[in-house]
Amino acid sequence: MKSVRSKPKPAPVVRLDGRRQAPKVIDWEAKHEARQKIRNFDRAGFNEFNSPVVAKLKRAYFRAYGEKI
C-alpha cells in the first residue's frame, strides 16, 4: 500500500535584503565554440555513453548555459 501523504513542496528562496539575482551575461563566442567542439566529437562517433570526455563537455555546457545538446 502506498503512502497517501503528499510530499512537501520546496519553499521559494527569498533574499532578506531584497536584492534580485543579476541576469547571466553569456559569452556567445565561447558558447558557439563549446557547441562546435561537442558537435565535432558527435560527428566522429563519440557520445556521452562511449566517451567520458564528451560526457564531461556536455555536463559543463549544460551547467554553463542551461541547454542540452
Image (cartoon, rainbow, N blue to C red):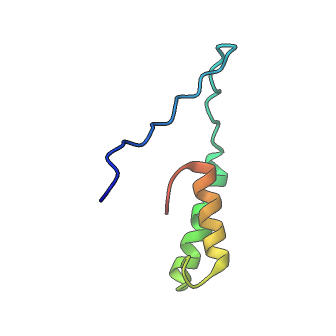
Residue 51: quarter of image: bottom right
Image quadrant containing the N terminus: bottom left
Nearer-the-camera pick, 52 or 37: 52
x, y percent for residue 60: 65, 59
* Residue at the farthest front position: 1
Q: Which residue is at the front of the view, 65 or 5?
A: 5
From the top left corner, tell me how far across and down residue 31 is, in percent: 61, 53
Residue 11 lies left or right of residue 23; in this view the side is left
**Residue 30 drawn at (x, y percent):** 67, 53
Nearer to me, 68 or 17: 17
In the rendered image, the residue lying farthest to the top is 17
* Residue 33 in view (yes/no): no
Is residue 44 depicted above or below 68 in this figure?
Answer: below
Q: Is residue 4 visible?
A: yes
Residue 14 location (% of width, % of height): 60, 22
User: Does 7 appear above or below 63?
Assistant: above
Viewer-side residue, 3 vs 55: 3
Quadrant for residue 59, please give it: bottom right
Q: Relative to 66, is 47 above or below? A: below
What residue appears at the point 57 percent right and 85 percent down from the top-left corner?
Answer: 50
Q: Which residue is painted at 63% across and 35% down in the image? A: 24
Tell me which residue sits at (56%, 83%) in the image: 46
Q: How many marks?
A: 0
Residue at x-position 67% and y-position 76%: 53
